[in-house]
């Protein structure tokens, strides 16, 4: 299936503008920066998961030659009242945000930052950490989400009360609780729905915390000048949001903070959050010098935000013909040390691909003594949607129904009512399901022992948000495109191509540049799969403005009315015939050469905030083989089908899908946060955390379905996030077929497979 | 010798080769992802052998011949691997790319016609979190074909 519209640039595969710098080692990432007179700073972290800080004594560290400053929570100004943007989720209290930068009175997880030290050399800063004495009074930690919700659990925050927004609001009490919030999605009549079913099953599922696993550790370098201007260089997904946060927590005017974005080495949601930048800023203020900070891999695992571990209980009813009559889910998500888990993503996702008349989903946001969670690719949805699709697969097995037929028969259609309210609009759920069913992979017979096949669907809502961009036209027909959204994996070409398409010129003739916070107006983060959509809208508007101005100039030259001039999609500007009856026209480049004489160069700006986001559906098919001696699961074949709206640069769309699949397979099989009873992560290294390597995966076939988003001039839907959702349930079903055991606790490690196969040993 | 140039530098006794390249010599193409040899982002070629520069002490490299990502392209243009990574869209964020190119270069120098499995096995010391490896494998296959002529 392809989009009906014919494009010249969209759908081609030009070489990305920033590519050469990235294959030659020239591209400058956050950690590559060196400033004259720069100091190096490290963070002192808590060895305990839950403790009261009795005393911090930095005198020995300060006495070490080369050490220039030590800061603690007390060096921050008093946090503003109220809440502020924090990553992709709901705004969080400033106080909690500042306490996560540096702990105040209590540490709430192992790795919680307690102090920071700046020195003339990285080794000296490291040595100084051991010389900072911190006296703790240890408290019992709570590490399991259900335990944290129980009556007698240790309480993390004495002042946290449950915010219950459900109709009955039963959890609203004046008692301190680790349950920060209870929310609900409901429609229809559950009892009636279950009564109509021929089979009803209820299952429990758990997923662990998972880390985004970006290869580049967090970093941040700051210089606080004598006149009070703060400049920060870093690798983030949201330099404008960071600027606003820094202005708030350090209490300086927004215009006196400049954040310079350097290249970013992966984020997947995890680099929407600040950890080091405010500390580097305070250390720079104290020392008068630029201060550089960076994390070790262990710090990245222990002290940044993974996604939530979750406990999910799902009950579903199905008729013998495969009609799903009711679905009920209970989701408890680990928020980590402060409120704000992505439970909403799980709640929205679980029944999204299907039109189920009777549903109820209850979500709980729960604090416990683990790192504060962050966004991770389709935040909350893999953990929330996996249980729903797993139960559908089990029901299909019990009723001996084809899992794709059942999905097709229950599919959500255009304009159906969404579980979370409102209507779907134009969606591609059914098209994905039909493409899966008809795919040679699904049609093929899986042969061989210990093998199994699984299918599953995924949903992600995508995002829009504030976007500002500008463009200027040069005399030689090239165009500079100024972007304020971070390019994390190919949005420079995706946005340049949309401007080129609008102008009828080549992608190579548009040069995109991501600029600092002084260079263009506010842009929301690079997250929610919003950048190709919203940045593309802005690029289209810039293109339309340039077209209008080019028409104006041509009319001036030809001394005719503007409405006699037409700007063609081929980039040719055509006017009325001249006195001799000859056609008059300019190529884009020819007219650019005349700009200087007809009023000067053209520069345009666009500010947009579009809500016409197109949602994404995807469905995956996987074949696995289980080694019954070792318990290892081998992925034999993988096919990922996705409604991508319009594939602007198909290679990078495929790449997003393949990358999401790899992360989802990691969640299903190998990755996990393994905590000891003391709250210490016992596998805080890449070797032990076990992300998939090249050897663990096959080629990943992608099928791009194009159901254009009617809310975008080129039909763009975000593509980056949804592909991480289906692998969990698809792999779980394939392993179930191969072994005869349903593993409802992820990851399905070799140890858990061997335990199930040989329970007596 | 670093990238064919005689190079002198002073390093702290605790500096790894990666520290020395990045902080003392100003060659920041080799990246730090883990600092313990797990991710391969810092890979360089030392006397013909692929090494993780975070696991080599700077003091050990005296009189060694080292090639970093900065020394892979020539005056004539990009190395076939670099060109193939661009054409096959084998990078997204690009932080692991220098390591993958160094590692692939070392592979093709000793095995000009590797199978898909050979490539996957050899590159399993390099972690990429963006691509799912598919396009990286294809880029190495495509470069290998071009280099064999």
Image (tube, coloured by chain):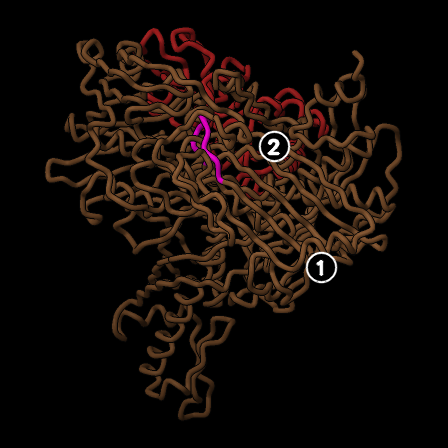
A715 or A620, which is in the foreground? A620
A750 or A325, which is in the foreground? A325
Question: What secondary structure is marked by label 1?
Answer: helix
Position of residue A751 relative to residue A459, above or below, is above
Chain ID for label 2?
Answer: A
Position of residue A534 relative to residue A734, above or below, is below
2 or 1: mark nearer the eye: 2
Question: What secondary structure is marked by label 2?
Answer: strand
Q: Is residue A714 magenta?
A: no
Task: Count neighbours of disc 1 (C-alpha within 10 A) and say few if under 14, some if 14 to 19, many if 20 or more.
Answer: many
B89 or A665, which is in the foreground? A665
Same chain, marks 2 and 1?
yes
Residue that appears at 40% across and 53% down: A512
Residue that appears at 24% across and 42% down: A80
Letter of the brown chain: A
Q: Are marks 2 and 1 in contact (CB under 8 Å)?
A: no
Q: Reading the chain from its start, which is encountered first: label 2 or label 1? A: 2
Q: Which residues are magenta?
A: A365-373
Picture quadrant where residue B16 is located: top left
Q: Which secondary structure is most common in the magenta stretch? A: loop
Give the position of the N terminus of chain A as an image quadrant.
bottom right
Indicate left or right for A450 with A98 as reference.
right
Residue assigned mark 2: A207
Where residue A736 sits: x, y (%)?
A: 79, 33
Indicate left or right for A536 with A645 as reference.
left
* Any part of residue B149 in sight: no
Indicate left or right for A613 with A372 as reference.
right
A527 or B18, which is in the foreground? A527
Where residue A122 sits: x, y (%)?
A: 30, 17
Residue assigned mark 1: A431
Please tell me the colour of chain B: red
């Amino acid at each position: 299936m392809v989009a009906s519209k014919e494009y010249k640039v969209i759908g081609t595969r030009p070489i990305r503008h920033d590519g050469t710098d990235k294959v030659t080692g020239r591209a400058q990432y956050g950690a590559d920066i060196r400033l004259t007179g720069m100091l190096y700073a490290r963070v002192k972290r808590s060895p305990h998961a839950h403790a009261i800080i009795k005393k911090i004594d930095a005198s020995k560290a300060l006495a070490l030659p080369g050490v220039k400053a030590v800061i603690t929570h007390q060096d921050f100004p008093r946090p503003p009242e109220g809440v502020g943007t924090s990553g992709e989720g709901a705004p969080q209290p400033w106080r909690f945000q500042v306490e996560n930068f540096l702990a105040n009175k209590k540490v709430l997880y192992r790795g919680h930052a307690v102090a920071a030290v700046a020195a003339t050399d990285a080794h000296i800063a490291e040595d100084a950490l051991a010389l900072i004495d911190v006296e703790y009074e240890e408290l019992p930690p709570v590490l399991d989400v259900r335990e944290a919700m129980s009556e007698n659990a240790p309480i993390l925050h004495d002042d946290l009360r449950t915010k219950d927004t459900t109709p009955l609001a039963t959890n609203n009490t004046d008692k301190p609780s680790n349950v920060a919030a209870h929310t609900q999605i409901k429609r229809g009549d559950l009892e009636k729905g279950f009564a109509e079913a021929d089979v009803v099953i209820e299952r429990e599922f758990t997923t662990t915390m998972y880390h985004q696993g970006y290869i580049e550790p967090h970093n941040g370098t700051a210089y606080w000048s004598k006149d009070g201007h703060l400049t920060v260089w870093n690798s983030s997904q949201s330099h404008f949001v960071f600027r606003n946060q820094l202005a708030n927590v350090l209490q300086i005017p927004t215009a006196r903070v400049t954040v310079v974005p350097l290249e970013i080495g992966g984020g997947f949601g995890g680099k929407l959050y600040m950890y080091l930048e405010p500390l580097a800023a305070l250390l720079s203020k104290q020392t008068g010098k630029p201060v550089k900070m960076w994390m070790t891999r262990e710090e990245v695992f222990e002290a940044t935000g993974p996604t939530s571990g979750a406990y999910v209980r799902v009950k579903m009813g199905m008729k013998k013909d495969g009609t799903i009559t009711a679905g009920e889910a209970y989701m408890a998500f680990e928020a980590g040390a402060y409120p704000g888990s992505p439970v909403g993503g799980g709640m929205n996702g679980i029944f999204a691909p299907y039109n189920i008349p009777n549903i109820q989903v209850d979500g709980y946001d729960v604090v416990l003594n683990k790192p504060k969670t962050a966004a991770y690719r389709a935040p909350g949805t893999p953990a929330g949607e996996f249980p729903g699709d797993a139960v559908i697969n089990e029901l299909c097995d019990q009723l001996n129904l084809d899992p794709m037929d059942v999905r097709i028969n229950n599919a959500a259609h255009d304009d159906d009512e969404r579980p979370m309210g409102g209507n779907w609009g134009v969606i591609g759920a059914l098209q994905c399901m039909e493409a899966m069913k008809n795919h040679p992979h699904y049609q093929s017979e899986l042969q061989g022992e210990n093998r199994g096949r699984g299918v599953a669907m995924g949903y992600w809502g995508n995002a829009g948000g504030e976007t500002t961009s500008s463009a200027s036209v040069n005399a030689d027909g090239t165009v500079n495109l100024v972007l304020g959204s971070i390019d994390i994996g190919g949005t420079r070409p995706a946005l340049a191509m949309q401007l080129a398409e609008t102008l009828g010129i080549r992608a190579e003739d548009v040069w995109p540049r991501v600029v600092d916070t002084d260079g263009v107006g506010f842009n929301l983060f690079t997250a929610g799969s919003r950048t190709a959509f919203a940045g593309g809208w802005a690029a289209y508007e810039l293109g339309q403005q340039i077209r209008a101005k080019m028409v104006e100039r041509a009319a001036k030259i030809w001394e005719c009315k503007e409405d006699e001039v037409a700007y063609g999609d081929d980039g040719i500007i055509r006017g009325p015939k001249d006195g001799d009856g000859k056609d008059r026209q300019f190529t884009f480049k020819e007219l650019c050469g005349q700009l200087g004489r007809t009023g000067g160069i053209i520069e345009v700006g666009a500010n947009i905030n579009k809500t016409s986001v197109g949602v994404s559906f995807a469905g995956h098919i996987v074949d696995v083989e289980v080694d019954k001696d070792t318990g290892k699961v081998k992925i034999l074949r993988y096919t990922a089908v996705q409604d991508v709206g319009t594939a602007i640069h198909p290679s990078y769309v495929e790449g997003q899908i393949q990358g999401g699949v790899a992360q989802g397979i990691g969640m299903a099989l190998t990755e996990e946060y393994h905590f000891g009873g003391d709250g210490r992560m016992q596998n805080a290294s890449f070797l032990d955390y076990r992300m998939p390597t090249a050897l663990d995966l096959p080629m990943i076939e992608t099928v791009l379905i194009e159901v254009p988003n009617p809310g975008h001039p080129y039909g763009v839907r975000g593509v980056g996030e949804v592909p991480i959702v289906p692998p969990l349930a698809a792999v779980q079903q394939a392993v179930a077929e191969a072994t005869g055991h349903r593993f409802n606790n992820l990851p399905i490690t070799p140890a858990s497979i061997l335990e199930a196969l040989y329970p007596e040993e | 010798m670093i990238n064919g140039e005689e190079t002198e530098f002073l390093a702290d006794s605790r500096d790894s080769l990666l520290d020395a390249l990045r902080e003392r010599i100003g060659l920041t193409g080799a990246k730090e992802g883990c600092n313990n040899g797990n991710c391969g982002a810092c890979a360089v070629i030392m006397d013909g052998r692929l090494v993780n520069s975070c696991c080599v002490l700077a003091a050990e490299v005296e009189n060694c011949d080292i090639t970093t990502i900065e020394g892979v392209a020539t005056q004539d243009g990009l190395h076939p691997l670099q060109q193939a990574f661009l054409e096959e869209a084998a990078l997204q964020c690009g932080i692991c790319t220098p390591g993958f190119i160094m590692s692939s270069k070392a592979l093709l120098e000793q095995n000009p016609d590797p199978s898909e499995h050979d490539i996957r096995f050899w590159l399993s010391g390099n972690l990429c979190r963006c691509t799912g490896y598919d396009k990286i494998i294809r880029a190495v296959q495509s470069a290998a074909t071009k280099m064999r002529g």
